[in-house]
Amino acid sequence: MILVTMTFAILGFLSPSNRGGLMTAMLLLWVFMGIFGGYASTRLYKMFKGTEWKRIALRTALMFPAIAFGIFFVLNALIWGEKSSGAVPFGTMFALVFLWFGISVPLVFVGSYVGFKKPAIEDPVKTNKIPRQIPEQAWYMNPAFSVLIGGILPFGAVFIELFFILTSIWLNQFYYIFGFLFLVFIILIITCAEITIVLCYFQLCSEDYLWWWRSYLTSGSSALYLFLYATFYFFTKLEITKFVSGVLYFGYMLIVSYAFFVVTGTIGFYACFWFTRLIYSSVKID
């Protein structure tokens, strides 16, 4: 969704001065990209010998949008309470729910069905049935420490651009440099992949094979730094005194941070997944 939106913006299809257009394009793309989401999640699920593809499709269709929509609904209720004209009308809310359940969810199921019909991804080597004991790890290989360290680099790649985006959203200035933003996004993808692969390699070298969730959290932890930066920005650049306005700011930044977590985490995980398959397929077992 992000890649296609940025491509359209670079080509000039989406004007930065028409902010609603950008948001509408992102929402519609998200809805129609459900088919790819369902396909990717079910392919991975089948690799783990999973059989209940409908359950995984339902989770794919509901988990991220439900949390984002839940926060959005609470924030909108607060604006309604303030009788502000900035509140999203009930009709628009209904249209969003219709797009979600009427188009996105069925498309996820279609993608999941196609993905489940494909042959499962084969492991390059046989895995032992009995898990080996993991030796004592060095202090810097502690999961919490390595996860927090891993998030610094991806955040460092985007934080200057983040300042301009936050200024564009909250201080009513227009954002025009989509070409540069696209470049930053590509750098973010490369950085997430590299840092996760490096830390995963160190982890495998010290005979710790529990890399699956750690690879996701390593690059995903950059979202924590994004939220901390948003907090810093709130107290240094914005002059917001009303309680509801403050809640709105942190609520929307929470949605953005959550989306950033999902994107960066997925990039990290798939990079690690590709890397481990590559190194183990090169291993010659006589």
Image (cartoon, helix red, strand yellow):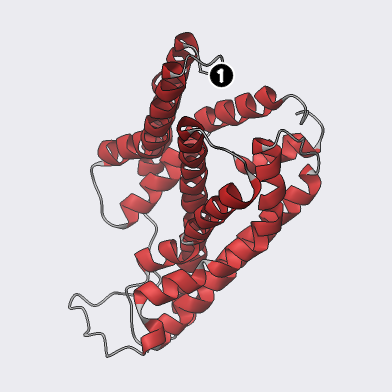
Let me know if residue 220 appears in the view. Answer: yes
Residue pictured at 36% horizontal, 33% vertical? 66
How many residues crowd around disc 1 within 10 Å: few (fewer than 14), some, or many (20 or more)?
few
Classify mark 1: helix, strand or loop.
loop
State the residue position of label 1: 86
Above or below: residue 40 compared with residue 151: above
Q: Place residue 191 in its image quadrant.
A: bottom right
Establish if 122 lies above or below 106. Answer: below
Quadrant in which the N terminus appears: top right
Residue 114 sits above or below residue 273 on the image: above
Query: Where does residue 9 sit, x and y in percent of width and height?
Result: 75, 35
Q: From the viewer's perspective, is 70 left or right of 238?
A: left
Front residue of this view, candidates 221 and 197: 221
Residue located at (34% from left, 86% from top): 207
Q: Nearer the viewer, residue 266 or 162?
A: 162
Q: Residue furthest front?
A: 241
Q: Is residue 21 left or right of 57 when viewed as pictured? A: right
Q: Residue at x 29, y 57 (%)?
A: 48
State the residue in front, 24 or 149: 149
Residue 228: percent from left, percent from top = 51, 57
User: What's the residue type where badge 1 is placed?
Assistant: Gly
Place of residue 141 in the rendered image (x, y in percent of width and height, measured from the top left): 39, 83
